[in-house]
């Protein structure tokens, strides 16, 4: 019998329909790469550092603010690279977040690195490379369009209400936003594990301050960063854009915006792929990124 995911029965229940071999892989990952902590800028940072490999791949968390939700990708890339992946502390200003990224990497002895971001993490890395282009040599952006000023302005108008919204409702809203991206291929066993991880993160791993900071960073990003094709014109690094053709988060117009914003990028489109292309097209997805990072 597979060891229980958690001693907390509420969390264990989230995984009751997850196949035992999937639960075993998550447990093995947690044992191999336990979270580490560092005090940086008055914040407690939690991060995963796989610790081996000459090249460093830095992967900030997605929209759950919890790095471990992407453990499949972290485990795969750890076979060839030193993967460093932090959770997001409740930092509202994007420049402060990026300064924390750099201080963490400095503390870990990292100078040059590749960066990879998917979904919310893809928005973060687009600004990160503009802030610290001298530190980053390659960038992979998956399943996301450019930062959206109109959406952020609407979010800013709603923040007064969010500030007084009960925490359980904020969690429900975050979970609902992920559910909108749920795959039509939900019968794939790996999705059961992913959604259990997402719900553990949203309901048990992040708090009110973390949720509000996720929103505040998107507002701050579009208020204080401009995005144009000229931004990285002189940057010598390389860019890979990865999309699913059926991803509701990246409809054709968003994909076109991205290719115009990054005209130098290599682009990979997975036919029929949705937001969860890292699961539905896992082998091909990893192969494309492996090839890009190796060259």
Image (cartoon, helix red, strand yellow):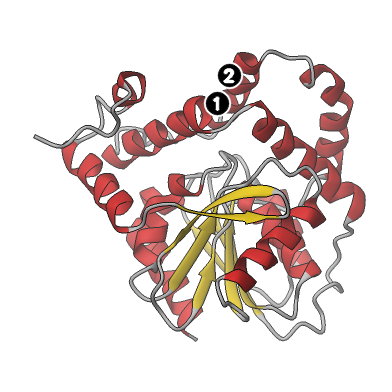
Up the image or down, 287 lies above or below 28; here it is below
| Residue at 44 percent of width and 50 percent of height | 70
Residue 225: x and y in percent read 88, 57
Assign a secondary structure to mark 2: helix
In this rendering, does residue 162 appear at all?
yes
The furthest residue to the left: 1
Q: Is residue 135 left or right of residue 29?
A: right
Residue 254 shown left or right of residue 48 in the figure: right
Marks 1 and 2, how far apart at CA: 5 Å
Residue highlighted by disc 1? 175
Percent from the top left, x then y, of residue 202? 52, 29
Query: Could you say where residue 180 lies in the image, as x and y percent from the top left?
Result: 56, 29
Q: Residues within 10 Å of mark 1 (few under 14, many from 20)?
A: some
Q: Which mark is residue 172?
A: 2
Q: Where does residue 45 sit, x and y in percent of width and height?
A: 59, 51
Judging depth in this view, the residue of 193 and 179 nearest the camera is 193
Callout 1 touching callout 2 (CB < 8 Å): yes
Describe the element under mark 1 as helix, strand or loop: helix
């Amino acid at each position: 019998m597979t060891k229980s995911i958690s001693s907390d029965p509420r969390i264990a229940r989230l995984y009751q329909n997850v196949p035992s071999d999937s639960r075993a892989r998550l447990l093995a990952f947690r044992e191999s790469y336990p979270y580490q902590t560092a005090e940086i800028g008055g914040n407690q940072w939690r991060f995963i550092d796989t610790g081996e490999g000459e090249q460093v791949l830095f992967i900030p968390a997605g929209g759950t603010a919890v790095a471990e939700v992407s453990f499949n990708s972290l485990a795969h890339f750890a076979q060839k690279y030193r993967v460093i992946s932090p959770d997001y502390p409740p930092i509202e200003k994007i420049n402060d977040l990026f300064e924390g990224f750099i201080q963490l990497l400095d503390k870990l002895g990292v100078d040059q690195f590749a960066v990879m971001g998917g979904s919310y993490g893809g928005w973060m890395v687009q600004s990160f490379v503009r802030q610290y282009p001298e530190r980053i040599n390659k960038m992979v952006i998956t399943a996301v369009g450019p930062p959206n000023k109109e959406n952020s302005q609407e979010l800013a108008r709603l923040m007064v209400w969010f500030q007084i919204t009960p925490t359980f409702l904020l969690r429900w809203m975050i979970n609902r936003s992920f559910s909108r991206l749920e795959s039509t291929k939900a019968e794939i066993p790996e999705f059961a594990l992913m959604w259990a991880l997402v719900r553990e993160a949203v309901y048990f791993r992040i708090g009110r301050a973390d949720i509000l900071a996720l929103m505040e960073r998107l507002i701050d990003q579009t208020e204080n960063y401009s995005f144009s094709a000229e931004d990285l014109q002189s940057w010598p690094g390389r860019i890979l854009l990865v999309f699913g053709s059926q991803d509701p988060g990246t409809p054709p117009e968003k994909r076109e915006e991205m290719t115009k914003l990054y005209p130098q990028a290599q682009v990979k489109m997975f036919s029929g792929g949705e937001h969860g292309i890292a699961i539905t097209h896992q082998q091909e997805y990893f192969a494309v990124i492996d090839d890009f990072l190796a060259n």
